[in-house]
């Protein structure tokens, strides 16, 4: 039994699953926007502005272009193999079983830890909003143990409950998931547009000078600064669009709608990120964001005297993070479903509920695990594992496009990434640059997770893989 045995594209498409097809282009676009626009606008813009100054807008564009190269590769694979599983399935086709299992295991880590991390941020905004309304939750139930120095905490109850609520929505059907996500994305976009309309009049062009105070790359106060380091920070604002490709088996005409959804969500998100960044650094001198790192949008509202908007913006932030959690949990459930269907995970995770037409059991299993992680674990250090898992997936998908163009040029592709081989090579180089920049603790934790995964593969997956039945 070769560890590098591969799935055949035509066979995968022929054995499509009983999942309900209901998603169209705008549904996929909204899924992508739901995953991308969240902590990027409401949190990372402060840290990014201190790193790149007003040129953070350029950093966002560079990060978006680089993610766009990876997105083009995802789009081509999605049109060639319109089945659930995202980078896991694509790796199975291009590189073989062992590589596919590793990337699937990494994606489970990315989505679970990503959703848990965002749920903690969601809890902070939600608790703050309740406090503004005169409702105070017990401090012991607002954070994991040891999260806040000098404060006794045991469990993050809001984070735990929001993950369970979203898990329930995902488990009862893709139609319900789509409707909830679409509604929340519309509200989130409405809040962002309202913010832009109310603050654009307060821009002072003098705040944009110097526009690029730290150059492309330099050291300022002992830390990297400039446009490129800024791009490294905000790159992670775009993480999540890859989850769109997990919906292939619930998409109508996936070979055309998946590429459109992926690329449209990236384009719309980039426009909003750039506009927000220019407004925020135009209204407030970028150096002042040091006082508002956790809520940079608040600096703009204080400067313009529009504190009445703070409640609305807080609601927008809560909704924004909710959609991020939803898309990540959705992607996670479809990855584990695909791995189970291929025999690499137990059948429990691939069982499709006849009433809801969703992988009901697997969705709840990982939903509960993620909820407990958000409630019990201090995720400040572990969150970097999300980054390394995502970057690994991007690299393999980009390399996979190169390999499949060379090895299987005859396969039908509803969408062909332009500029191959340059496009995937640029994506790989950029991702490798960011991977190298991660600290050694992240690599150690990643290797531990990898060892656990390989133990599962050699102890169960390899022997139970459906390819053994050939």
Image (cartoon, grey):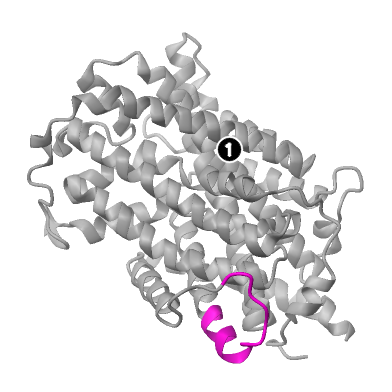
Q: Is residue 234 highlighted in magenta?
A: no
**Rendered image quadrant of residue 61:** bottom left
Expressed as whole percent of the image width and height from the top left, the position of residue 445 reads 49, 64
Q: Which of 42/369 is in front?
A: 42
The structure residue drawn at horizontal position 47% and vertical position 28%, both measured from the top left corner, is 190
The structure residue drawn at horizontal position 81% and vertical position 47%, both measured from the top left corner, is 360
The quadrant of the image that shows the N terminus is bottom right
The quadrant of the image that shows the C terminus is bottom right
Q: Residues within 10 Å of mark 1 (few under 14, many from 20)?
A: many
Q: Which range of residues does the magenta coloring cover?
A: 400-415
**Rendered image quadrant of residue 310:** top left
Expressed as whole percent of the image width and height from the top left, the position of residue 225 reads 18, 56
Which residue of the protein is positioned furthest toward the top in this rendering? Answer: 134
Q: Which of 176/412 is in front?
A: 412
Expressed as whole percent of the image width and height from the top left, the position of residue 80 reads 66, 73
Q: Which of 67/205 is in front?
A: 205
Expressed as whole percent of the image width and height from the top left, the position of residue 40 reads 39, 44
Above or below — where is 6 with respect to 436? Answer: below
Residue receiving disc 1:
375
Q: Is residue 413 highlighted in magenta?
A: yes
The structure residue drawn at horizontal position 45% and vertical position 38%, both measured from the top left corner, is 146
Residue 23 appearing in the image: yes
């Amino acid at each position: 039994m070769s560890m590098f045995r591969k799935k055949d594209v035509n066979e995968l498409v022929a054995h499509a699953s009983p999942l309900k097809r209901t998603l169209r282009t705008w549904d996929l676009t909204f899924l992508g926007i739901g995953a991308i626009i969240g902590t990027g606008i409401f949190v990372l813009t402060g840290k990014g502005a201190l790193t790149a100054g007003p040129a953070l807008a350029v950093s966002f564009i560079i990060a978006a272009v680089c993610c766009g190269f990876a997105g083009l590769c995802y789009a081509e694979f999605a049109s060639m193999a319109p089945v659930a599983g995202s980078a896991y399935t694509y790796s199975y086709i291009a590189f073989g079983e062992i590589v596919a299992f590793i990337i699937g295991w990494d994606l489970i880590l990315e989505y679970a830890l990503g959703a848990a991390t965002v749920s903690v941020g969601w809890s902070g905004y939600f608790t703050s909003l309740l406090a503004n309304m005169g409702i105070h939750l017990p401090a012991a139930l607002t954070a994991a143990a040891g999260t806040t120095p000098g404060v006794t905490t045991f469990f993050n109850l809001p984070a735990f409950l929001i993950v369970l609520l979203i898990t329930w929505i995902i488990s009862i059907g893709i139609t319900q998931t789509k409707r909830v996500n679409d509604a929340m994305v519309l509200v989130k976009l409405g809040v962002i547009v309202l913010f832009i309309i109310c603050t654009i009049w307060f821009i002072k062009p003098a705040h944009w000078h110097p526009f690029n105070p730290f150059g492309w790359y330099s050291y300022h106060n002992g830390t990297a600064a400039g446009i490129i380091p800024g791009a490294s920070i905000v790159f992670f604002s775009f993480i999540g669009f890859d989850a769109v490709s997990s919906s292939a088996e619930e998409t109508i005409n996936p070979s055309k709608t998946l590429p459109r959804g992926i690329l449209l969500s990236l384009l719309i998100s980039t426009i909003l990120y750039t506009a927000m960044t220019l407004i925020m650094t135009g209204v407030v001198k970028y150096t002042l964001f040091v006082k508002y790192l956790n809520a940079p949008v608040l600096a703009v509202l204080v400067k313009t005297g529009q504190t009445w908007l703070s409640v609305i913006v807080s609601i927008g932030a809560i909704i924004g993070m909710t959609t991020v959690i939803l898309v990540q949990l959705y992607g996670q459930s479809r990855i584990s479903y695909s791995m189970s269907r291929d025999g690499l995970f137990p059948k429990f995770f691939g069982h499709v509920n006849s009433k809801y037409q969703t992988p009901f059991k697997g969705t709840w299993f990982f939903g509960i695990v993620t909820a407990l992680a958000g409630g019990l674990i201090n995720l400040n250090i572990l969150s970097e594992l999300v980054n390394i898992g995502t970057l690994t997936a991007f690299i393999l998908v980009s390399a996979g496009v190169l390999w499949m163009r060379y090895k299987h040029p005859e396969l039908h592709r509803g969408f062909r990434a332009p500029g191959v081989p340059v496009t995937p090579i640029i994506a790989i180089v950029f991702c490798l640059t960011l991977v190298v920049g991660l600290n050694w603790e992240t690599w150690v934790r990643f290797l531990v997770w990898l060892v656990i995964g390989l133990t599962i593969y050699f102890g169960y997956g390899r022997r139970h893989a459906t390819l053994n039945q050939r």
